[in-house]
């Protein structure tokens, strides 16, 4: 999931360099959403593994 976030971030940067503002904004917002979903899943997984004792 973090890989997809980085891909959308790179697409946003490339689109911004070439002047495609709408595409850059859309890709950046998608990258943000995927990154925050990744963080939530990571924290839940970390807490679950701490509770289980691993």
Image (tube, rainbow, N blue to C red):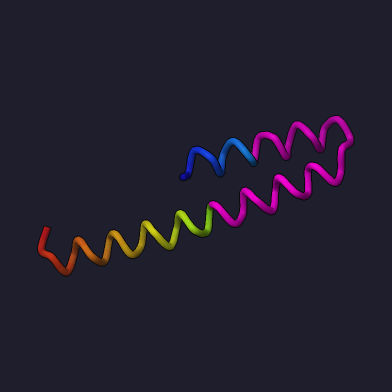
Left or right relative to 12: residue 37: left
| Magenta stretch in the rendered image | 9-34
Above or below residue 8? Residue 42 is below
**Residue shown at 75%/31% (left/top)?**
14
Q: Which quadrant would residue 16 be assigned to in this image?
A: top right
Q: Position of residue 23 (x, y in %)?
A: 80, 42
Q: Position of residue 42 (x, y in %)?
A: 37, 57
Q: Residue furthest bottom?
A: 51
**Residue shown at 10%/63% (left/top)?**
53
**Residue shown at 52%/59% (left/top)?**
36
The verdict on residue 31 being magenta is yes
Left or right relative to 31: residue 13: right
Above or below residue 27? Residue 17 is above
**Residue shown at 69%/35% (left/top)?**
11
The verdict on residue 46 being magenta is no
Q: Position of residue 24 (x, y in %)?
A: 78, 43
Left or right relative to 9: residue 22: right
Name the main secondary structure of what is drawn in magenta. helix
Q: Quadrant of the image for the C terminus? A: bottom left
Left or right relative to 15: residue 8: left
């Amino acid at each position: 999931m973090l890989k997809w976030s980085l891909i959308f971030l790179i697409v946003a940067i490339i689109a911004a360099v070439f002047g495609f503002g709408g595409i850059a904004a859309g890709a950046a917002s998608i990258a943000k959403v995927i990154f925050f979903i990744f963080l939530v899943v990571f924290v839940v997984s970390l807490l679950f593994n701490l509770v289980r004792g691993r």
